[in-house]
Amino acid sequence: FLKRRKRWSRYPPGPSSLPFLGTMLQIDFHNPHVSFTQLSKKHGDVFSLQNCWSNLIVVNGFKAVKEALIQKSEDFADRPYFPIHEHLGYGENSAGVVLARYGHAWKEQRRFALSTLRNFGMGKKSLEQRVTEEAGFLCSAISSEKGRPFDPHFLINKAVSNVICSLIYGQRFDYDNKKFQRMLQLFEQALDEEAGFLPQLLIVVPWLLRIPGVQQSIFRAQKDVLEFTDDLVKEHRATWNPTQKRDFTDAFLQEIEKAKEHAGSSFNDNNLRMVTVDLFTGGTETTSTTLRWALLFMLLHPDIQCKVHEEIDKVIGRDRSPQMEDQANMPYTSAVIHETQRYGDIAPVGMPHMTYRDTELQGFFIPKGTTVITNLSSVLKDETVWEKPHQFYPEHFLDADGQFVKREAFLPFSAGRRVCLGEQLARMELFLFFTSLLQHFTIRLPEGQARPREDGHFATTLAPHPYQIQAAPR
Ligand code: HEM
């Protein structure tokens, strides 16, 4: 490997590596974005690492990330292959969307997912009504806390995942449904299983998975999640009428029927579970974590919360539900939501990419097949772009007249070919849930409680540490 690396004279520089482990000990895998940003100060915006014998490149700052993801989108559109996911059923034509290699199966599933989610209302009035209705359930559940201190985490999770459940399984669950609660817990545990040093080591040294008991003990929740979704599909099949499309699962089952004559199609039973789990994990944890950050920032910045309340009262009032049309007249609230995504930084290292061909980045040579980490955190907090990168400052998205301004370096959904597939849905949910919550409540720190921490806990997403709120009816 080292001989090969020496031949690439313009390969990006990086820290010196140890035998076997390479540079792995230089990274805090519970805070990788922080390690990457520190290393970029010494080695530059594009630097190289070595996880055991596997090469990776880390791209930092708006300029370099933009070149990779937008200007050379296809060169960086592939995903690295993770043998650790094989035991979950990940294979050539059953790789879901998130982890699928750049090629026919990914294109087919991405196109299908986007068009099917649109058919079921993504970006339309029908889904807007579903989200508004769910926001109503969420506000009622919060009201029933009667001003007592509580942790909003699981209530928000339930509301957000019910939107995805409606799209995928055509049903929502009551918040006290035990099966639903168990499912959400498993999803969270499954994300935790991906974080830390050990999963990273297993990615580069997959034979360690052959040690008896390793797989079972490390990926237990991920297996349980798949079994859980299998049960939901089984229930669906039992009530399925091939002439009807109730939801995403029905639409997929129809494609499986059509594809039966085509060997090698990505529409197969195994891929149905992979794709639905992708939409579930992609669509629940991210959006609900962002809303948890939003409430935390409102609690920490009562002056900002007050301005949001004033705008809601002026544009929507107290008697009707918020609608997406209101957004255009609510620059301050929109700026607060954008700033929550920027400063909350919930997907700090995005998803790993891989070079699809030999390419160049910022003048460096990057060979085909190199794993590429886009440090989105370093873009959202790029000191050359943002006026106050390390503060919660909604004015980042407002001009001198208080009008909303888009910012090019606002990339929480990443960019290019692999840009988040659910961006439109997420934006709708963030606006409708956030405005509904603040229309009904003032969020306060319960008396006698210490100021919550503002730093996050990393487990695939960067989430706030647990905190309690008091929601006073307005
Ligand atoms: C991918 C962020 C909501 C489904 C991604 C990526 C990011 C991201 C950073 C990686 C892009 C890359 O590889 O460069 C977010 C954030 C969300 C959100 C911040 C909410 C605030 C959603 C929702 C859904 C979803 C609601 C589902 C409907 C996906 C899928 C991918 C993805 C399927 C993989 C795309 C591909 O590989 O082609 N998202 N996401 N996301 N997201 Fe989201």
Image (cartoon, rainbow, N blue to C red):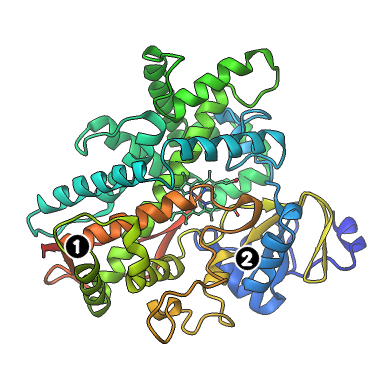
- Residue depicted at 67% across the width and 23% down the height: 265
**375, above or below 80, in the image:** below
- Residue depicted at 62% across the width and 72% down the height: 62
Residue, disc 1? 439
Q: Position of residue 462 (x, y in %)?
A: 44, 59
Quadrant of residue 40 within the rendered picture = bottom right
Q: Is residue 44 visible?
A: yes
Which is nearer the eye, 23 or 132?
A: 132
Quadrant of residue 174 within the rendered picture = top left
Amino acid at circle 1? Gln
Q: Are marks 1 and 2 in contact (CB under 8 Å)?
A: no
Q: Position of residue 402 (x, y in %)?
A: 37, 81
The number of numbered discs placed on residues in the rendered structure image is: 2
Which is nearer the eye, 363 or 193?
A: 363
Mark 1 or 2: in front is: 1
In the picture provided, is 63 more to the left or to the right than 280?
Answer: right
In the picture provided, is 224 more to the left or to the right than 15?
Answer: left
Tell which residue pokes out farthest to the left in this image. 146
Residue 26 shows which numbered tag? 2
Q: CA distance from mark 1 to mark 2?
A: 46 Å
